[in-house]
Image: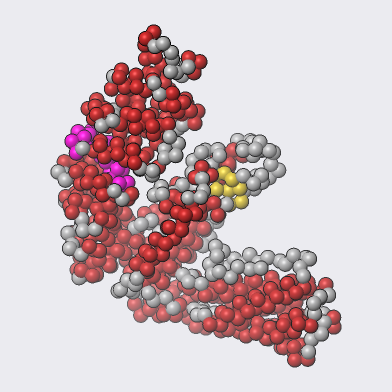
Amino acid sequence: MIRTENGSGRRILNFPAVHPCVNIASSTLLSSLINLSNEISKFQHKFFSSNKRNAKNAIRLIHLLQPFLHEIRENHSNLPAPVTICFSELHVIFQKLFFLMEDLTREGVQLFMLMESGRVANMFRVLFRSIATELDVFAFDSVYVCVEGKEDVLLLMKQAREGRFDFEVDDEETVMCVMNVLNLFEKRIVPNKFDLKKVLDYIGVCEWSEINKEVKFLDSEIGFEWLNDEKRKVEFLSSLMGLMSYCRCVMVEVLDCEEEGKSSKKFDSRKESQMILSCLNSDDFRCPISLEMMSDPVTIETGHTYDRSSILKWFRSGNTTCPKTGKSVSSIEMVPNLVLRKLIQQYCNVNGIPSGDSGRRSRDITRTAEPGSEAAGGAMKLLADFLCESLDNGNVEQKNHAAFEIRVLTKTSIFSRSCLVEAGSVPLLLLLLASSDSSAQENSIAALLNLSKYTKSRSEMVENWGLEMIVGVLNKGIKIEAKQHAAAVLFYLASNPDHGNLIGEEPEAIPSLIRLIKDGTDRSVKNSLVAIFGLLKHHENHKRILAAQAIPLLVNILKASQKEHLVTDTLAILATLAEKSDGTSEILRFGALHVAVEVMSSSSTTSRLGKEHCVSLLLSLSINGGENVVAHLVKSSSLMESLYSQLSEGTCRASKKASSLIRVLHDFYERSSSNYKASVIPREQFIHVW
């Protein structure tokens, strides 16, 4: 009646206990109650970082009750109603006690549970007072219980009432130590390592991976708190996260093998996900209203699922029906479809598609522009100074460690990026790119990639001769991952109007991107494509990309790739190149016209945005390529169907482009209709779209 898997999606210190149904059989209820008591007893072998005495006392008291429960089950097949009610209430209490034990021993939450130890002690007290109350009204006269069994129950009741489930002294002292460290962070004073070690030892968190789990948990809790209007715990959680981030960098000299250990597991789970997802239709992942991949699927009263933002707009517009069935709904309550959401994320990961959840994450990351608390801000600034010192004066291993930590810290935090740039990390990371150590080179270029998302860092990279170093990694990086990161850095640098042309002037920049596309891995192709697209915003790079023989590679991607995001990016580049006559000539020379028509008519590998780029490409080819191109397009009935569908189903820009292309084809047909015996395009389909 209860899941015993640790961390099964339940929020910490939230106890979703389920009351047994009214008609439950006595034997079933007792068996479930005994199983729950056994599960609670198993916690005696686990490590409790806080509330040690309270937890042990709780387990001991549950032990006292077990013989009584077994005796009742053995002697009674049916129980009187008052006894059943009492055991039902005990079942709910036992569930809550199990959840509490689970939280106290869960990995990654030890600091949080320590800081909540006073509240947890009170929870123990309330739960055991509740057990005593239920047993106090137990109808002993209606069941047979031996004298020893009844004495055990009476002893439990007495100890449950009188037992001191207090805020333990050791917990309180360690909490005060944490608060003192946080106060030092607020004043930007470096804390004593002895105090930090005392806290880490007390909660049993010493390895890098263990501390990292604490950071990830606190970050997720901050994310939940940001969904609340009050955001009461954001400051508290941010301070704790700042402390653990600082400890992860400063207190651990050797990284454990968490990342390596995950690699094989990730591979196995990826294969399993591919097998599961191959049986599913990806169209089911799209919202029936927006037709986009759902980022936050919710189910309404009728049982149909929509993206939260879309169905909210529907209801706020005054609609009181289900969009799919037209059935009236009495409530607009929405239930998150967590299973579908996980499947969508797995589908996006397996197929290399930017997750539909990325928009929500993009909004969430704005919360990281500020530290969340003074202590968190102070900790990050002290940490930035520490890491820059390691980069500047450390040995190779220390520099690599510092680069790795910067890579981790800047992955999702805007404030961390700003602190590290202000501390002078960019020039130091650029110097590390020349390292002969493959790990140091990869970590430094990955760190620079994260920092390049912060606008100020881009100028620093260019001013410190970073372009030549980054292109050097792109061209001759030791590992393919380093080359992939370098390509992505160029994309962000190219967003600056002054830098795009400078990148193009680097002799090896564009040729290296083309070679990376030939590597063939999805990440290599993806990063190179977005970098090339970014460079095309600067007109000087147009001819350079054509000269690098990009067109045949792009056409091959359209022919062979089944990846929606790669097809979309490729079409975006071709559409941009086709805007000029020399680009159109090259695209036509390599036979891209009929490929584009096939892509336009396909639905399996082309997104709505991809269709938009494809329409733009065909329109530019029609305008710049002459009547031969238009004549070829006019003969394709499937193309015309796709173009007409874009008028109603495509994006706003796709609709306008499709309208213009239909007019071009229509006008050509009208001019040449006298030369045709029969029309390929039925006249009744012609419409004027203005």
Mark yes or no: residue 281 visible: yes
Which residue lies at the image location 26% right of the left edge and 45% below the top edge? 517
Q: Is residue 304 above or below residue 677?
A: below
Which of the two residues, 48 or 575, is positioned nearer the viewer here? 575
Which residue lies at the image location 50% right of the left edge and 80% below the top edge? 47
Residue 173 screen position, x and y as percent:
48, 81
State the count of labels: 0
Q: Is residue 234 above or below residue 591?
A: below
| The quarter of the displayed image where residue 9 is located | bottom right
Q: Is residue 281 above or below residue 150?
A: above
Whether the magenta-drawn stretch holds residue 99 is answered as no
The residue range painted magenta reads: 525-548
Quadrant position of the N terminus in the picture: bottom right
Mark yes or no: residue 126 visible: no
- What secondary structure do most residues of the magenta stretch adopt? helix
* Residue closest to the far left: 507
Which of the two residues, 240 or 139, is positioned nearer the viewer here? 139
Which residue lies at the image location 30% right of the left edge and 34% below the top edge? 574
Residue 435 screen position, x and y as percent:
18, 62
Quadrant position of the C terminus in the picture: top left
Whether the magenta-drawn stretch holds residue 543 is answered as yes
